[in-house]
Image: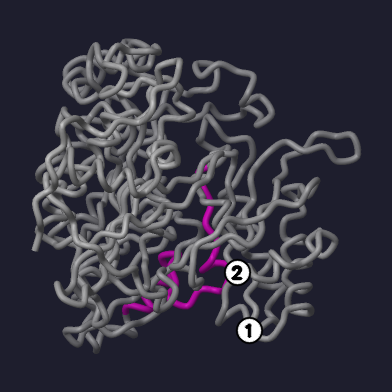
């Protein structure tokens, strides 16, 4: 039920500024900075052949700068931080002074079911090539550290035997997709997004025409009513809805992203059928490619284009220039049916069960993946999917194996019954491996969780209404600090004349998949900074004030926005 788009004598174009912004359809494709120049000279996808045939044979010192600091990202590779460099030096040292001779490697899962074979391969890579490291990211990726360039071809070979890849896992590309972890199996699912994800990947991932974007492009697709893919903070999101006449399909959101200039995505107000979804995705990413701002990388995300155009113009350009037909108006998603982390034991529509489990801040190294493969096999379960909350979900667990599965998770460092703060805390990579980080995150968050489990054991309401704690090592918000109940942004702070690792505090943010009716950004309090060593003290103090002051039915976020600054100190 589509109607032809009206004829257009010329494409709709944004207004021209006196200085070009590097928009290809407005200013032409002449590169306006060094980054754009090397991307045009030799695209990032081409570096794989050199990695396999040159760098893996000749070693780290054979890699030229444009490949090392640029094109390697197109295959999921970043140099990691050299050990022992203080966070206070992050902003003063050059990249080559910060970097080690080893790499972080990112594997995209794209909402894929990881069966026992895939888990075993992922675990083997951790043990054989990454010194036992492996993390679930909040983008449903698996991330390794300590990877040597000599080992990358063998890692790729192993991944490809189980249908996994690192293609465009980083770089100015379509990054890994967020997909509902319970796609195709949840009893209350609106629409299964798996066919759409697979079709987009088949047609477009690795396509050279989409491998030179202004910057990263993030995708989220769900058909579950818990809205479990943090859709408000992606460049494009397709969210399951039911049209009163056309049946199940998707609501289209665009232009979400956080970093240092956070902006929540907006609905275009259109309804997208399953058959149209891949074409619509392709239209939106090409708008970004053709009209996105390339001159300044700080302005090179889709959110800045949407801010200038607005949703009405964006929809018109999509329909007239890129689709050639009008999309029908559609309904918004209903409020989230619950938390989107899927922790705990839940009935599937086929009578088996899925079990959501929490590691600690996403860490799944040290044999966890291999042990999980064995547990999946032993219990006859189907496999595992990752979540957007650094958790995992075991799918297809036979009814008579649920108890054994739940018990078997515990020795692996996983639990289906996590404490409130283990469930609700995420953390980015931090100072241990990230060249942008200023403070430690993973170890700090792990210690804080353990401390809060003891200190706040007498607050039963936390079990029903967990308070999200997101810990980030720098301002870039990989751990979504602006959309947490309590978001901690790492920085060096001054305490009694001494510089120490600490955090600026964001309070009262949240997304609909974490129990809110609508997403919103947190507030900051002037001068409110907390030393890393005092985070548990601060969170305990804040939670107890909330418990004492909250109104009937008031959430932590609501209280944080109405409380006076003194109460938030």
CB contact under 8 Å: marks 1 and 2: no
Q: Residue at x 40, y 45 (%)?
A: 310
Q: Earlier in the sequence, mark 1 or mark 2?
A: 2
Q: Residue at x 58, y 35 (%)?
A: 437
Seen in the picture, residue 90 relative to 519 is either above or below; the reply is above
Q: Residues within 10 Å of mark 1 (few under 14, many from 20)?
A: few
Seen in the picture, residue 386 relative to 295 is either above or below; the reply is below
Q: Nearer the viewer, mark 1 or mark 2?
A: 1
Is 28 situated left or right of 416 in this image? left
Is the image coloured rainbow, by chain, by secondary structure, or in one colour? Answer: one colour
Q: Nearer the viewer, residue 534 or 223?
A: 223
Q: Residues within 10 Å of mark 2 (few under 14, many from 20)?
A: many
Q: Residue at x 78, y 72 (%)?
A: 545
Q: Quadrant where the N terminus lies?
A: bottom left
Seen in the picture, residue 324 relative to 207 is either above or below; the reply is below
Seen in the picture, residue 417 relative to 207 is either above or below; the reply is below
> What x and y, as percent, mark residue 355?
33, 76
Element under label 2? Answer: loop
Q: How many marks?
A: 2
Which quadrant would residue 537 be assigned to in this image? bottom right
Which quadrant would residue 352 be assigned to in this image? bottom left
The part of the chain drawn in magenta is: 405-429
Residue position for label 2: 467
Give the number of the disc on residue 553. 1
Which quadrant would residue 509 be assigned to in this image? bottom right
Is 508 situated left or right of 57 in this image? right
Q: Residue at x 30, y 69 (%)?
A: 331
Q: Nearer the viewer, residue 16 or 498?
A: 16
Q: Nearer the viewer, residue 468 or 409?
A: 468
Is 225 situated left or right of 493 in this image? left
Q: CA distance from mark 1 to mark 2?
A: 14 Å
């Amino acid at each position: 039920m589509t109607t032809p788009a009206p004829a257009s004598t010329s494409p709709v174009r944004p207004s021209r500024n006196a200085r070009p912004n590097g928009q290809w359809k407005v200013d032409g494709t002449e590169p306006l900075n060094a980054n754009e120049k090397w991307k045009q000279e030799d695209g990032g996808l081409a570096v794989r052949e050199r990695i396999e045939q040159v760098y893996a044979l000749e070693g780290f010192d054979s890699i030229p700068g444009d490949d090392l600091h640029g094109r390697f990202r197109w295959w999921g590779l970043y140099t990691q931080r050299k050990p022992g460099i203080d966070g206070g030096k992050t902003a003063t040292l050059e990249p080559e002074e910060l970097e080690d001779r080893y790499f972080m490697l990112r594997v995209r899962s794209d909402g894929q079911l990881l069966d026992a074979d895939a888990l075993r391969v992922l675990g083997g890579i951790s043990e054989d090539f990454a010194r036992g490291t492996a993390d679930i990211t909040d983008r449903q990726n698996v991330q390794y550290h300590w990877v040597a360039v000599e080992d990358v071809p063998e890692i790729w070979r192993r991944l490809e035997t189980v249908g996994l890849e690192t293609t465009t896992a980083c770089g100015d590309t379509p990054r890994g997709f967020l997909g509902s972890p319970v796609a195709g199996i949840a009893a209350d699912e609106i629409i299964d997004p798996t066919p759409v994800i697979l079709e987009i990947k088949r047609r477009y991932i690795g396509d050279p025409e989409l491998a030179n974007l202004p910057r990263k492009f993030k995708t989220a697709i769900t058909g579950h009513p818990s809205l479990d893919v943090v859709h408000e903070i992606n460049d494009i999101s397709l969210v399951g809805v039911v049209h009163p006449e056309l049946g199940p399909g998707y609501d289209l959101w665009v232009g979400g992203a956080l970093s240092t200039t956070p902006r929540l995505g907006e609905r275009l107000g259109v309804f997208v059928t399953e058959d149209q979804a891949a074409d619509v995705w392709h239209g939106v990413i090409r708008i970004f490619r053709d009209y996105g701002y390339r001159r300044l990388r700080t302005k090179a995300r889709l959110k800045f284009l949407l801010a200038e155009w607005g949703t009405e113009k964006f929809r018109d350009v999509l329909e007239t220039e890129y689709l050639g037909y009008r999309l029908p108006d559609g309904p918004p998603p209903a409020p989230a049916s619950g938390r989107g982390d899927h922790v705990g034991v839940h009935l599937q529509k086929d009578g088996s069960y899925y079990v959501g489990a929490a590691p600690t801040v996403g860490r799944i190294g040290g044999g966890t993946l291999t042990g999980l493969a064995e547990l999946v096999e032993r219990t006859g379960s189907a496999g595992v999917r990752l979540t957007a909350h650094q958790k995992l979900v075991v799918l297809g667990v036979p009814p008579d194996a649920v108890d054994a599965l739940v018990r078997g998770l515990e020795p692996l460092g996983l639990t289906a019954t996590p404490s409130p703060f283990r469930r609700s805390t995420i953390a980015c990579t931090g100072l241990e491996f990230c060249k942008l980080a200023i403070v430690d995150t993973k170890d700090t968050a792990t210690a804080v969780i353990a401390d809060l489990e003891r200190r706040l054991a007498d607050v039963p309401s936390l079990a029903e209404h967990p308070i999200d704690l997101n810990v980030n090592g720098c301002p870039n918000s990989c751990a979504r600090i602006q959309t947490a109940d309590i978001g901690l942004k790492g920085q060096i702070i001054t305490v009694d004349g001494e510089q120490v690792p600490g955090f600026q505090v964001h309070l009262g943010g949240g997304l609909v998949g974490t129990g809110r009716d609508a997403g919103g950004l947190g507030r900051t309090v002037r001068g409110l900074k907390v030393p890393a060593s005092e985070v548990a003290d601060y969170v305990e103090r804040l939670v107890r004030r909330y418990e004492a002051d909250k109104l009937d039915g008031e959430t932590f976020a609501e209280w944080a926005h109405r409380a006076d600054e003194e109460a938030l100190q």
